[in-house]
Every structure is written in structure tokens, then in C-alpha cells.
Image: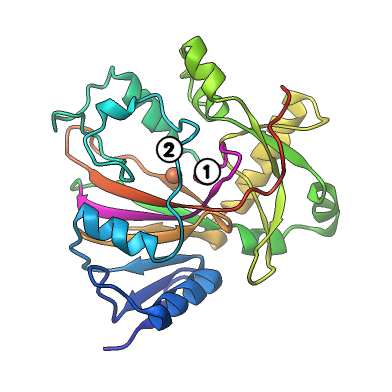
Amino acid sequence: MSLSIRQIHPVFVGEVSGVDCREPLGPAVVAAIEAGMDQYAVLVFRDQRITDEQQLAFTRQFGKLESYATPGHIKQANESRLAPGMADFSNLDKSGGIMSDQDRVWFFKLADRLWHSDSSFRPVPAKYSLLSGRVLPSWGANTEFADMRAAYDALDARTKAEVEQLVCLHSLLFSREAIGFTEMTAEEKAAFHPVRQPLVRNHPVTGRRSLFLSAHAGAIEGWTVPESRMFLRDLTEFTTQPAFVYSHEWRPFDLVVWDNRQTMHRARRFDRNEVRDVRRTTLAGDGILAGLASS
Ligand SMILES: [Fe+2]
């Protein structure tokens, strides 16, 4: 059976058939999936009963795994339930039990329900994220995606001109502060030092422009914080209107791959007393602007 992709939303998102993600793909299939990613920005692979090792091997066929030279979490590496390279997006702790609702790691995770682009808080933000749904709760827990290219195209001319040269500061501190989680240690605050990212970016293959928004963006260079936050909030509201959003209803063993350079996403609520075991691998992108912010 050969690979085919069916578009499942009016502006983006493809459902792929004819691929077994457990097997090595070969260059033609890798190229076809990459072309699909460039076009659809999100690809859904159904019924992929992969192990962590197979997920890592599948991911590496599309580039280099993101390295964690800078931390992306308050959880220490030795607290992880999963092997290196696998990011745990479950609600389980190291022992496999459901995390306490008083756990700082849980507080930290809750901010994934804000619209964001993965690792926009790193100097080199993420290219693709690959999320495998292993155990899913009985209600809720959709992942929603917004097409930042279609949203950019729909901006009025004045706003397009206004965003053109803007640079934002991104940090995990900003996204956590937005949900009222501000109790960070001095060490965590230092580790989550803001980085600079352009507000408009061009896709390296297609050249399509998109807005590089994220809940991690907390300021615009040269603007006051209140003015920045209100403009970023307005833009986020505009770009996440229903016409640009796909809501993924998970089935067990779905593998969903998204391009963080062209989309934002958010997790949705579920019953925290039920297990949600989803596991992510992440590919490194390219640095867009040089240097860290000075503030
Ligand atoms: Fe995310």
C-alpha cells in the first residue's frame, strides 16, 4: 500500500495512510511525508502501535532530535519515567501513579493548555513535534492546532506592516505566570532566561509567511509590557478563531506530527483522575535570530 494524504480541515491538516511508522521508511517515503508536512503543517497517522524505541527511530528519519542543553521543564532528568529523548506529556509521576493536584510539575504542565509553539523559549526552537497517544482518558484531552500561515494571510495590510520587523521575548516564565504559577526558584528563573524570536517568519522550503506566536512570548522589544501583552493577546485571539483551528480527537495509538514553525497548538481539559499517557519526541529547528536577550 502506498502513502496517501487526505486533507481533513479546510485550510490544513492531512491524514496519512499507507505508512507503518514502526518500519524504516526509505528516502522516497521520508520525502513524501516532509512534503506533506510543508503543505498541511499537521499530519495524523492512525493505528501506530509504536514503542518508545520505534518512535525515536521514526523521528530521527526527519532530522536531529532536540537537545536539552537548556532546560525546558522544572522536572529534573532523574525524575523522568521515560528514557532520554522521550518527553513525558502524561499525568503520571515516576512511579506510574497519577500526579498529585498539588504537584509543581502538574502546575507547570497545566500551562500547555495555552496556545503555544513548542520550544519557542529556546534559542533554537523546535521543528516538528511527534505525539503518540498510548492511553487516553474517556472525555476531553483533545489537542487543538491553529494554522499560523492562513492566519497571517488573513491579517489586514496595516497589521501585516506593523508586525513585520517586531521581535518578541519568549520564556517559560511568561507562560507559567499567565496561569498564576510564579513560584520558581532562583535557579529555575535563571534557566528560563528570555530569548529573542521574530514575530513573522518564512517557511524555509515553501517561503510561506506565518506569525510566530506562543504563550511563551511575554514582551515585544521596544514596547512596554502592557502594550506588548495586549497586542500579543489580540493576535492570538485573531489567529485561533475557528476558521484556522483543527481539534484533534485522540484515538489510541494515533501519532500526530506538527510543524511548530507554521502552527500553534494547545492541550484541552480532561478528568485528571483518569490516565492520559502521551509521549513526545521533538526535532530541532534552526535558530532564527542570533543571541540571547539582554533582559
Ligand atoms: Fe506543546
Q: Residue at x 35, y 25 (%)?
A: 75
Residue located beneath label 2 in the image: 112
Q: Is mark 2 within 8 Å of ligand 1?
A: yes
- Is the Cβ of the residue at disc 2 closer than 8 Å to that at disc 1? yes
Q: Residue at x 81, y 29 (%)?
A: 223
Q: Position of residue 163 (x, y in %)?
A: 79, 48
- Between 211 and 72, the one nearer to me in the picture: 72
Q: Is residue 264 magenta?
A: no
Q: Quadrant of residue 258?
A: bottom left
Instruction: Determine whether the beta carbon of the residue marked 1 sits less than 8 angstroms from the nearest atom of ligand 1.
Output: yes
Give the residue type at disc 1: His
The part of the chain drawn in magenta is 115-136
Q: Secondary structure at mark 1?
A: loop
Q: Is residue 32 left or right of residue 170?
A: left
Which disc is residue 116 wearing? Answer: 1
Q: Say what amino acid the circle numbered 2 marks.
A: Asp
131 in the magenta segment: yes
Tell me, yes or no, if residue 71 can be seen here: yes
Res 182 visible: no
Q: Report crowding for label 1: few under 14, some 14 to 19, many 20 or more residues within 10 A (C-alpha).
A: many
Residue 170, above or below 279: above
- The location of residue 19, given as percent across then percent down, is 29, 77
Image quadrant of ligand 1 equals top left
Residue 136 image point, x, y percent? 20, 49
Q: Quadrant of the C terminus?
A: top right
- Residue 123 in the image: above or below residue 106: below
- CA gap, disc 2 to disc 1? 7 Å
The image's mark for residue 161 is none
